[in-house]
Image (cartoon, rainbow, N blue to C red):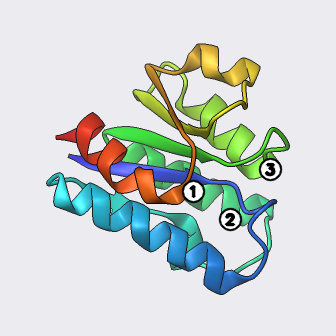
Amino acid sequence: MKVFVAFDVNEQGDRQTVLATLELISNALHAAGVESYSAHVQHDAPLSGQTIKAALEKIDDCDAVLAFVQSDNISEGMILELGYSYIRKPIHIFTKEGISLASYELADSVTEWQNLDQIEHLIKERFA
């Protein structure tokens, strides 16, 4: 199985923090026997029509989407990835506790977390 990781960079800050969180998610998926892809790891380019098209093509190559939500102010890129995935791929949302967005109604599962220390266990539990 291969999972596309939709990740919102609006609330993350610097690139090192983004990559560290993505590494945590990727390691948890790999521990569950799942291959992962994140556009943010592969490309350090600002959002554009080209970067969005590239991400959507990668979604087509994956079996499911894991959306990692940390704020109720999600980025345009994540909104497009979730909208594109709807009906095409199963969507699994991992959201910080207390955040609820209309897009969650499109998801196949929604898992809440309180702190990043929980992520590895929750991802393994969902994808194992």
Q: Give the foreground label among 2 and 3.
A: 3
Residue identified by numbered label 3? 75
Q: Give the foreground label among 1 and 3.
A: 3
Looking at the image, which residue is at 79% across and 60% down? 11
Residues marked 2 and 1 touching at CB (< 8 Å):
yes
124 horizontally vs 76: left or right: left
Amino acid type for the residue under numbered disc 2 = Thr
Residue identified by numbered label 1? 55
Residue identified by numbered label 2? 51
Amino acid type for the residue under numbered disc 1 = Ala
> Where 42 falls versus 105 (above or below)?
below
The Cα atoms of the two marked residues, 2 and 3, are separated by 14 Å
> Where 88 falls versus 12 (above or below)?
above
Decide: few, some or many residues near mark 2? Use Cα within 10 Å; few <14, some 14-19, many ≥20.
some
In the rendered image, which quarter contains the C terminus? top left
31 horizontally vs 111: left or right: left
Image quadrant in which you'd find residue 65: top left
The Cα atoms of the two marked residues, 2 and 1, are separated by 6 Å
Q: Earlier in the sequence, mark 2 or mark 3?
A: 2
Instruction: Tell me residue 113's x, y (percent).
Output: 53, 41
Residues marked 1 and 3 touching at CB (< 8 Å):
no
Residues marked 2 and 3 touching at CB (< 8 Å):
no
Image quadrant in which you'd find residue 104: top right
Looking at the image, which residue is at 68% across and 23% down? 103
Considering the numbered disc 3 on the image, is that residue within a helix, a strand or a loop?
loop
Give the residue furthest to the top.
Answer: 105
Looking at the image, which residue is at 69% across and 46% down? 78
Instruction: Tell me residue 16's x, y (percent).
Output: 63, 86
88 horizontally vs 82: left or right: left
Tell which of 39 and 24 is nearer to you. Answer: 24
Decide: few, some or many residues near mark 3? Use Cα within 10 Å; few <14, some 14-19, many ≥20.
some
